[in-house]
Amino acid sequence: MRRHYGFSPALSRSEKIIPRIADVSGEATASTLKNREDIPESDTWNLSLIFPDDTAWETEFANLSSRYAGVSNFRGTLGTSAANLARALEFETTLDHSIERLSQYAGLRLSEDGSNALSLDRDGRLSLLGAKISEACSWVAPEIQEIPDERLAEFLEDPLLSDWKISLQRLRRLKPHTLSNKEERLLSLAIPAVSGHHETFSQLTNVDMNFGSVRDDRGRNIELTQSSFSSLLQRPDHEVRKRAFTSFYKVFDAHRFTLASSLANSVKGDIFLAKSRNYPSALEASLFPDNVPVSVYGNLIEAVRGSLPDLHRYYALRKRLFNLPFLHVYDTYAPLVAAVQSDVTFDEAIVKVLDSLHPLGEEYTGVLERGLKEERWCDRYENKGKRSGAFSYGNFEGPPYILMNYKSDVFSDMYTLAHEAGHSMHTWYSRRSQNFQNYHYPIFLAEVASTFNEILLTEHLLATSTDRAMRAYLINRQVDDLRGTLFRQTMFAEFEMLIHAAEESGAALTLESFRSIYRALLNTYFGEGVVIDDVLELECLRIPHFYSAFYVYKYATGISAATTLASQVLSTGDTVRYYNFLKSGGSKFPIETLADAGVDMCTPAPVNAALALFSRRVNELEALLEA
C-alpha cells in the first residue's frame, strides 16, 4: 500500500531552508575534486548488501516489470474471503518490497554522480515503471473500501490478515475520502498535472535564473547561486551580505509575477485535491493520514508567537555586537562567534559522536560504530558529480545508508554525521521490530531521532569543553538551530495556513496578496528592531516547501519532541521509552507514538520546552559575549 518510485531518500538535511553558522572551510573546486572512480573503496558505501552489482539490479527490475500486471488477477476477489484478501495483499507487498530495494540502489547510485548516464537511465526507467505499477494497483484501495463493515471486521479477526491489520485499519479511515474506481483512476492521472507547479518552480529557480556574481570582502567575484547565497549571508562583512541580498532578490523581482502565479496554482491544486476527496480544508487533508489534530498545528503557532520577545532579544544582541545602526534581515545569519578552527577527521568525528551518544547504551553505540567503521554504511567524501548535502536512506533489508560530503575543517559536519546517524538508527530499530508493512515511520517522527542526536552532541561538547570561544560557538550554533528550525519554520507554516485559508474563503491569491500576508508575518516574527527591506516580501515565492505545502511544521514539532526526549534521557538515565519510540516505526499514529514516549504533542508543553531552551541559551550567550 506504499511505494517508492525513483530517488526519494527519507530525509535530506540540505533541503531545509535553514542558514547555519559558517565554518572555516577549504572550499573544493571542480578541478580539485576527485572523480568517483578515484575514491578509495573504504571511504564509500557498500551497496552490494542491496544488490551484488548492476546486473543483479537489472534482473530484479526485469522480474518486477514482468510480474506486476498479475495484480489484476485478484480484482473482484478482495471482499470474498480473508484468504483472498491476504493473497492479494501479499502479492502487492512483494511489489512494494521489490520497488523499495530497486529505488534505494538506483537512488544511491545516482547520488554518487548525478551526471552518470547509466545511473540517470536506471533511475528514469524505474520512475516510469513505478507510474505503471501505481496505475495497475489503483483499484486495490477502492475495492477494499467497498467491503461491508461487518465483513471486514470478520476478516480482521482472521490470523491470515494479522500482518496487515494495522495498515487495513488505516486504509479504512480513508473510506470517506476514497472515490470510486473510475474516479480514483482519473485522479491518479490528473495528479501529475495538478502537482506540476513544484517542478516548474524548480526549473525556473534552479535552471533558468541567472543570479550573476558578487564581489566578496577579498575582492573576488563569487558566482551567486541558491547555495552560495546562504553562504554569502554568513560573511562577516555587512556590505558583502547586502550586495548578495540585493543581487539575489533582484532576479526574483524580475520573475515575481510568474512565481506568484505558480504558487497560486499550487495552492489551488492542494485545495482541488482536498475537495475531491471530501476534506473540509487542504490543511485537514494533509493532517488526516497521520491523524494529527488541527490543534497541534495551532498550538505550535500560538506557543511560538508567545515567545517572540526572546527571539527579538536575540536580534537586539546581534545588533549590539555587530555595532550596526540598523539590523537588516540579511544581517541575522552572520555568526556572532568567530568560526571554529577545526581539523577533525571522519574517524575522529565518529568517536566524538559515539561518545555523545553514550547515554543510549552500548547496543546503540555498538551497532552504529560497526555500521560506520566496518559495514560501510556511509559514503564519506565529496567527488565530482556527487549530490550535495547529506541524507539517510534505508530499506527493510539493507543497511540505512548515509551520504555525506564530509570536510575535516568544517566543524558542523560532525553535527551532520550525528544527525544522519539518528535517522539511520531510527530505521535500524524500526525494521528489526516491525514487519515490512509497519516499519516505515512517518515524516512527523523522522526529524525527532536526528535532532535528538544533535542535542546530545551539543550537551557532550559543552560538558567537555572549558574554552570560552568554543562554548560560545556551540551555544550560538544551538540558538541559531532553534531559531531556524522552530521559529522560522513555524512562520513558514503559518504562511501556508493563511494563503490556503484565503483561497478557500474566496479571496484572490495575487502577487500583492502574497506580499501583504508575508510582510505582516515578517514584521511580527522579526520585530521592530530589524529592518524589513521591501524586496524580502518576495521570499515567500522562493521557498521550495511552499510548493509542497504543510510539511515544514514537522521540523518545528520534531525539534520540540526531541528536546523533551533528550531532557528525559539525560536527567533520568532511563532509555526505555526512547528505545520504544525508535522501535515503533509506523505501527501507531505519530501523536500516539510520542505520547507513549512521554511527549504529549496535543499540548504546547513540548514546544514550550524547546522555546525555554532557546531562551536559556540566549541568556548564556549574552553572558559569554557581553561580559
Image (cartoon, rainbow, N blue to C red):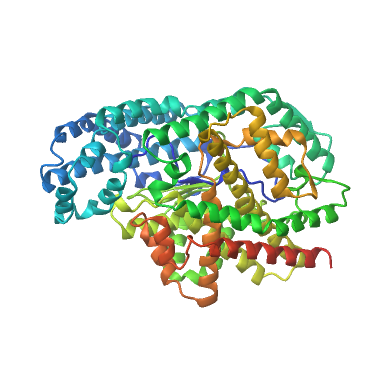
Q: Kindly give the residue lying farthest to the bottom in the view shown.
A: 572
Q: How many labels does the image show?
A: 0
The percent position of residue 463, horizontal first and vertical second, equals: 65, 71
The percent position of residue 565, horizontal first and vertical second, equals: 51, 66
- In the figure, 205 relative to 216: above or below? above
The percent position of residue 2, horizontal first and vertical second, equals: 32, 42
**Residue drawn at x 18%, y 31% as measured from the top left:** 72
Report the quarter where the N terminus lies. top left
**Residue drawn at x 69%, y 49% as measured from the top left:** 525
Report the quarter where the C terminus lies. bottom right
The percent position of residue 148, horizontal first and vertical second, equals: 17, 44
**Residue drawn at x 14%, y 42% as measured from the top left:** 79
Residue 429 in view (yes/no)? yes
**Residue drawn at x 37%, y 35% as measured from the top left:** 5
Asked if residue 46 lies left or right of residue 619, the reply is left
Q: Which of 365 and 577 is in front in this view?
A: 577
